[in-house]
Amino acid sequence: LARGGLAHDLAGRHVVVSAGGTREPLDPVRFLGNRSSGRQGVALAATALARGARVTLVGASLAVPAPAGARLVRVTTAEQLGEAVLEAAADADAVVMAAAVADFRPVSTQGAKIKKSGTGAPELVLEQTVDVLAQLVAVRPAEQVVVGFAAETGDETGDALAHGRAKLARKGCDLLVVNEVGPAGHPSGFEGADNAAVVLAADGAEVVVPLGPKEALADVVWDLVVARLRR
Ligand code: CTP
Ligand code: CA
């Protein structure tokens, strides 16, 4: 069927999209963050709106404006993002975790700005954050479709796609959108308007999406979600 909102195939559905990158504060002026702009998540929200969905967008430090018509919940940290997503997901038909969520955070946040003293440097002690996607999968209502994103690189143990397949199985979500990240300094997929990906489904389907607008990848994701929603 036609894409880009001509098919109102998400009418009557509530979808939750997380977007952007979380920030974990070190002190009042510094944080551990990542390069995510939120563009892909915002494209997912915009295309879902065009297809008739009610959209909750959980935005972590978005570098681009949220689409009009979405309910925007602004968050900063991984913990806040987790709380907002899990609350919104309670009555959602689908949840798409496009946000880049910190894996680690400082064990403690300094109340005052960390100052230089002598020539030494402070050691950062980190702890793992909660895995929001894993929590979603653990508590999801029956028939809720859960989608993860993964930026992968190949290494000596396997190529990006092999890592993606293993992650899909490990995470237990229905779909995993795998971006192959380019070499350092050429991080395709992060700040730009275009993206390329392979969407892996738990039922074995694999859809290759060539480099193109982030809205085109978003529409492919919604096509695959719609096919897995209860009627
Ligand atoms: N994710 C999450 N909570 C986290 C970390 C990641 O919900 N604390 C979600 C991301 O939003 C994404 C998916 O999990 O949809 C996969 O993220 P990724 O970083 O690729 O997976 P990790 O399990 O964190 O594995 P690693 O970073 O070690 O490859
Ligand atoms: Ca991670």
Image: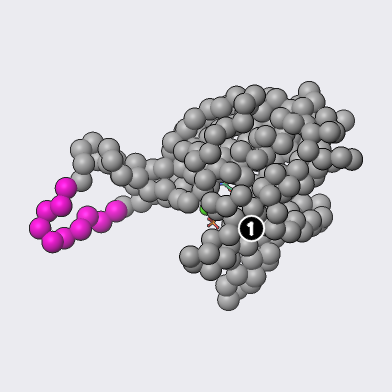
Locate the N terminus by quadrant. Answer: top right
Question: Is residue 212 among the parts visible in the rendering?
Answer: yes
Q: Secondary structure at mark 1?
A: strand
Which residue is painted at 25% across and 56% down in the image?
Answer: 123
Which residue is painted at 38% across and 48% down in the image?
Answer: 32
* Colour pattern: one colour
Neighbour tally class for label 1: few under 14, some 14-19, many 20 plus, Cα within 10 Å:
many
Residue 16 x, y percent position in the rendering: 65, 32
**What is the magenta range?**
115-124
Which residue is painted at 60% across and 70% down in the image?
Answer: 154
Quadrant of res 204: bottom right
Q: Is residue 37 left or right of residue 175?
A: left
Q: How many marks?
A: 1
Q: Is residue 218 left or right of residue 74?
A: right
Which is more toward the observer, 11 or 200? 11
Residue 29 x, y percent position in the rendering: 28, 41
Q: Is residue 155 left or right of residue 117?
A: right
Quadrant of res 209: bottom right
